[in-house]
Amino acid sequence: KSDEKLGNQIVNYALKFVGNPYVWGGTSLTKGADCSGFVMSVYQKFGYSLPHSSASQANCGKKVDIKDLQPGDLVFYRHGSRIGHVVMYIGNDEIIHAPQTGEFIRTESYSEYIKRNGNRVRTVRRYLD
């Protein structure tokens, strides 16, 4: 499928920024971005226009089942009653995200992340058609 190929291209582009800083409200892939600014800027490179807020991003695209994750899909997490974090699925049980202040854009095991945060998954979105 073409969207799967594009999903891998998006993931490979996102991986170039591992190690760059988390900056609250930031959208710079090199100087620093927050979780939603990071995925917004990655998708922008491929011609997709996402809002700069994880809560708004969670209302875009197509809802998919968490069991059907493909590279490039975004998983949104609740923080209290609202959406407060977004991660990008890489494939092979890996995610990439900009975690929080004082940390850096990084990859980690999705199953480990789910063990810690699974009860907070709000929605999974796919933007590729």
Image (tube, rainbow, N blue to C red):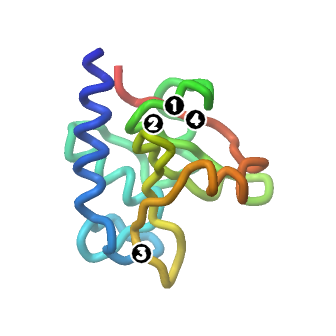
Q: Label 1, label 4: how many angstroms apart (C-alpha)? A: 8 Å
Q: Nearer the viewer, residue 63 or 6?
A: 6
Identify residue for label 1.
69
| For the residues bearing labels 2 and 1, Cβ distance under 8 angstroms | yes
Q: Is residue 87 above or below residue 46?
A: below
Q: Residues within 10 Å of mark 3 (few under 14, many from 20)?
A: many
Chain-order first, disc 4 or disc 3: 3
The residue type indicated by label 4 comes to Val
- In the picture, which quadrant includes the N terminus? top left
Q: Residue at x 37, y 77 (%)?
A: 21
SS assignment at label 1: loop
The residue type indicated by label 3 comes to Phe
Q: Residue at x 49, y 84 (%)?
A: 102
Chain-order first, disc 3 or disc 1: 1
| For the residues bearing labels 1 and 4, Cβ distance under 8 angstroms | yes
Chain-order first, disc 2 or disc 3: 2
Q: Which mark is residue 124?
A: 4
76 sits left or right of 18 in the view: right
Identify residue for label 2.
73
The residue type indicated by label 2 comes to Asp
Q: Residues within 10 Å of mark 4 (few under 14, many from 20)?
A: many
